[in-house]
Image (cartoon, grey):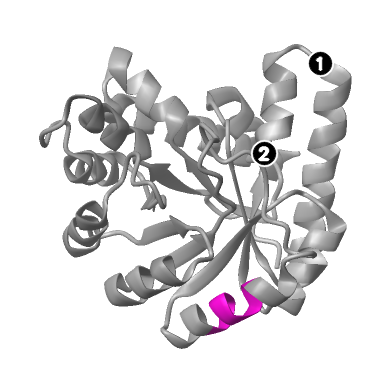
Amino acid sequence: MTSGGQLRLGLNIDHVATVRNARGGTRPDPVRAALLAVEAGADGITAHLREDRRHIRDEDMRRIRATISKPLNFEMAATGQMLDIALDIAPHAVCLVPEKRAERTTEGGLDVVGGHSHLAPFVAELSRGGIRVSLFIEPDTDAIRAALSLRAPVVELHTGAWCHAIETGDLVKAEAEFERLRSAAGLAGGLGIECHAGHGLDYETARQIARLPEIVELNIGHFLVGESIFVGLAESVAAMRKAMDEGRKAMQGA
């Protein structure tokens, strides 16, 4: 399943809600951010409803689902409570992610190998509900094959280790991590699994990963919300769209 067409951009709006919750009240409104992002060129909106509700809240998810014209990607842990909420809201897609109360952000991919029996009923139930299921995983051969066994139509490759290596100047590790991403994306595409990627991406890393033809969607949040403080959300989304398109064009011309 090699694409090579235009790369989709999903904007994660969690940290708009983080700013709102720091003060209480209703502003800034994550739904307003979602609408602005779609107008600026985002192809979808991603939001993570955490168990502790540290940023996005239940009513945010319902309002986003009812308001935006683009797909909603509902990130959630594989728990009974979250399953019930997702089935009630009925987003376009659910991305199952690992979740720990003490973590600042998602620290790695799901253990889809060791957690296979736990995850299987969630994938099946969400699929029966007409929701497209994605698994947030490490760029690992065993994880890709476990996703295939779980009959998940989509995987999202965790790009955090690669981005961190670039940020800290560890070029040897960065090269090795990018090769892991390249290999995992190629395997997923060859097995007919749609491949997404996300975590820690900025303009330059998005431009680079856009050169992998099997990857059809990037989900990016913290960087774009941070950039919006300086240039505005619409401008940051437009600049990301431009970087992604440049990377994909370079791949097609290679």
Quarter containing the C terminus: top right
Amino acid type of disc 2?
Answer: Thr
The residue beneath circle 1 is 170
Nearer the N terminus, badge 2 or badge 1?
2
Mark 2 neighbour class, 10 Å CA radius: few under 14, some 14 to 19, many 20 or more: many
The picture places residue 84, in percent across and down from the top left corner, at 37, 74
- Element carrying mark 2: loop
Left/right of residue 193 with respect to residue 93 in the rendered view? right
Q: Is residue 73 above or below residue 226?
A: below
Q: Is residue 121 magenta?
A: yes
Is 132 on the left-hand or right-hand side of 253?
A: left
Q: Is residue 152 visible?
A: no
Frontmost residue, 24 versus 195: 24
- How packed mark 1 is, by other alpha carbons closer than 10 Å (few <14, some 14-19, many 20 or more), is few
Q: Which residue is mark 2?
A: 159
Q: Identity of the amino acid at label 1?
A: Asp
